Image (cartoon, rainbow, N blue to C red):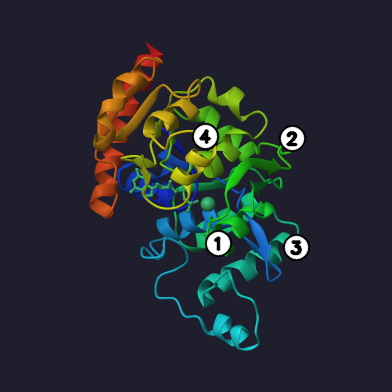
Amino acid sequence: MKVVALAGGVGGAKLVNGLSRILPFDNLSVIVNTGDDFRYSGLYICPDIDTITYTLAGLNNPITGWGRKDETWKVNEERETWGYPSWFHLGDKDLALHMERSRLIEEGYSLTEITRYFSKNFHISQTILPMTDSIVRTMINTRELGKLAFQEYFVKHKFQPRLTSIELDGIQTARISTEVEAELQSCDLVIICPSNPFVSIYPIISIPGIKRILNDKTIIAVSPIIGGKAVKGPAAKMFEELGMASSSYNVAKFYRGLIQGFILDRADETEVHLIDQWGIISMATDTLMSDLDSQIRLAKQVIKFGSTLAKGNEA
Ligand code: GDP
Ligand code: CA
């Protein structure tokens, strides 16, 4: 069974890592959010692609959730002595990758080609694809500071400003890549990872043309909300600021019309019957992935659940 996962950074990478351990490598492709991409210090940075890439390469820092393990910080430290306002910390090895990506972008290579090149260098066998080669930028409109680029909101301001709305700059003219289109057309199951629905998954499903392809697919989503809270990051806060309770129920509601199956945590089991009312088949299980074993355990359940739904759709 050929699987495509839609993912942001940390939450996405954990499930993708589990999936990578149980599926043949050529049966797993990951379409990754690029709405967080930005230029910093003259470098082209793709936070979510890098988290997925480092994770599949076994080089990620599991403590921070970003960057590489066994990292050194010499360049960053040196620049700080000059008073450089470094709100975005870049380790030395991480920096090398951003420098190389920036050079290749300048030479005219597409992000899809560059991502493939890094995957190959890190001996990753699965396919990692940016959601598009067009420039799409997630902008956060806030009460206190107006419109902020996503990384400014997320890292510089530690997602403290209150959100009023989310905009995707460049989305109208963004184009689906032939690679994304081909992977989606040929897959049997699409898995929406437990990534932030608003800023990790929404940009991907907003690429013009992608919904038309997704309409013919079996799609399941895994909730990033456990017991009303986000495991990490601003998802719960975003739900509340957008006027909704932070719950798996509202995650399922967000994906209503797109998904046939939904996996939520046992802590939210009471929401199953509410979600089922919409014709979405839901399943409660343990969804906290604190180590490799729990990533693999959840991945196995996701595949089992997804296969049953995909077979049902074929019949
Ligand atoms: P980001 O781009 O790095 O912010 O990462 P994602 O959007 O992919 O993931 C962030 C989401 O992952 C948050 O909403 C978390 O609640 C969720 N998340 C992180 N770890 C886990 C986990 O172990 N289980 C579940 N169910 N969700 C998780
Ligand atoms: Ca992200």
Where is 226 relative to 64, above or below? Answer: above
Q: Nearer the viewer, residue 298 or 254?
A: 254
Nearer the observer: mark 2 or 3; the answer is 2
Does label 2 point to a residue whose CB lies under 8 Å from ligand 2? no
**Cα–Cα span, label 1 and label 4:** 23 Å
Residue 135 at x, y percent in the picture: 71, 48
Mark earlier in primary sequence (4, 3):
3
In the picture of the structure, the residue carrying the numbered disc 1 is 155
Provide the residue designation for mark 3.
106
What residue is shown at x 53% (from left), y 44% (from top)?
A: 200
Label 2 CA crowd tier, 10 Å (few <14, some 14–19, many 20+): few
Closest to the observer, 39 or 68:
39
Q: Looking at numbered disc 2 in the image, what kind of residue is underneath it?
A: Gln
Q: First in sequence, mark 1 or 2: give its number.
A: 1
Mark 4 and mark 2 in contact (Cβ < 8 Å)?
A: no
In the rendered image, residue 16, in percent from the top left (x then y), is placed at: 39, 46
Residue type, numbered disc 3? Glu
Give the number of the mark in front: 1 or 2.
1
Q: Secondary structure at mark 4?
A: loop
Q: Which residue is mark 4?
A: 243
